[in-house]
Amino acid sequence: MRRLIKFIITPVTQTKWYADFLFAIPRFVCGMLLTISFGADKFGMPWTADHRHLDLFEVAYWFPQDVANYGGIFAMFPVFFAWMGAFSEAVGGLLLALGLKTRIASFLIMCTMLVAIFMQKWGGGVWGMLPAMGFLWVSMYHLVLGSGRFGLDYLLSKQLRTPKIEIPLAQL
Amino acid sequence: MKRIYLLVSTCIALLLGACVQETHLKTVTMRVDMNTVENVGNVGLRGNFTSPPWQETLLLEDPDGDGVYEGTFSQQAANGQISFKFVNQNEQFELPGQDNRSLSFEYKPETIVYTAKFNDPKAEITRN
């Protein structure tokens, strides 16, 4: 289990720190946009505006209705998919910004954006798809790269590194 | 194994809709006075609340022939705001070049009567 967690959170780091910094900028901006705006508008977070009347982790009433209109399996389990999509944006966006469990957050966001593009925005012109496509590209890169140097995963993965066993010379 | 049970329980809870915002019944009566308009027919309203938005006309009726067309619509909703305009002949929008009309909903059951004159942005809104 520890090995799996280590595999998931250990980031791919670039040879130069400023390359990691450059990758971290769109990750942070997209994550914050998702959690503060796109996610919090439809999912109850501590920073969701009061006038939306959303309790913590509660999805807006209209979102399952939208999801049900996609048809197929989405019409069978609209609440589940709506909740997962909203959670991915609101909580996944926060994790992405912090660089915490970056690959899991990226995977959730990637799935959500694919659904948004193909089930909701498709046919409405490229302009309407741009936000979802932007989030999709960022999540795809970070699914592979992880957080890079500028994220909490980098610090956690250092903690999880197997300690070196030092054998006293006297025992050799 | 416990984790699997927890995961399944969470999924079931989500499927049952335990985490969806509560909605309330909103009943809205729309009244529009068409007495100052010529060639009246197929009076209704179009707005951002239809699917697709602004493309579908919700028709109003004038059974007593007094020139005031009205219709009552009900829907479960939370809070929010709708934008709309009245139309004549199914597709002739009122208030050309002016802002859309808007109606806000509070987070409680509501019965609203919206009364206006065609092509006059003023409106009287009563809530119960």
Image: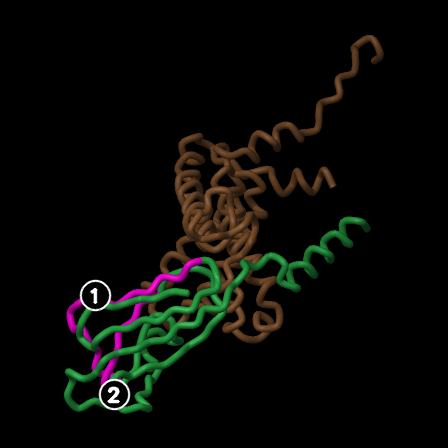
Chain colours: A brown, B green
Residue picked out by circle 1? B99
Is B99 contained in the magenta span?
Answer: yes
**Residue range of the region highlighted in magenta in the rendering:** B82-106
Establish if A125 lies above or below A46: below
Q: In this view, does A22 lie to the left or right of A141?
A: left
Quadrant in which the C terminus of chain A is drawn: top right
Please tell me which residue lies in front, B89 or B105: B105
Say which chain tag 2 marks.
Answer: B
Please tell me which residue lies in front, B39 or A8: B39
Residue picked out by circle 2? B66
Give neighbour class at mark 2: few <14, some 14-19, many 20+ (Cα, 10 Å). Answer: few
Helix, strand, or loop for circle 1?
loop
**Where does the image place residue B8, in percent across and percent down from the top left?**
73, 57
Mark in the foreground, 2 or 1: 2
Helix, strand, or loop for circle 2?
loop
Q: Which residue is found at the position 23% from the left and 86% from the top? A: B67
Is A161 contained in the magenta span?
Answer: no
Q: Which residue is found at the position 36% from the left and 61% from the top? A: B104
Q: Are marks 2 and 1 in contact (CB under 8 Å)?
A: no
**Where does the image place residue B91, in percent across and percent down from the top left?**
24, 83
From where the camera sits, is residue A124 visible?
A: yes
Of callouts 2 and 1, the N-terminal one: 2
Q: Which residue is found at the position 62% from the left and 62% from the top? A: B17
**Where does the image place residue A105, in percent across and percent down from the top left?**
55, 48
Please tell me which residue lies in front, A105 or B54: B54
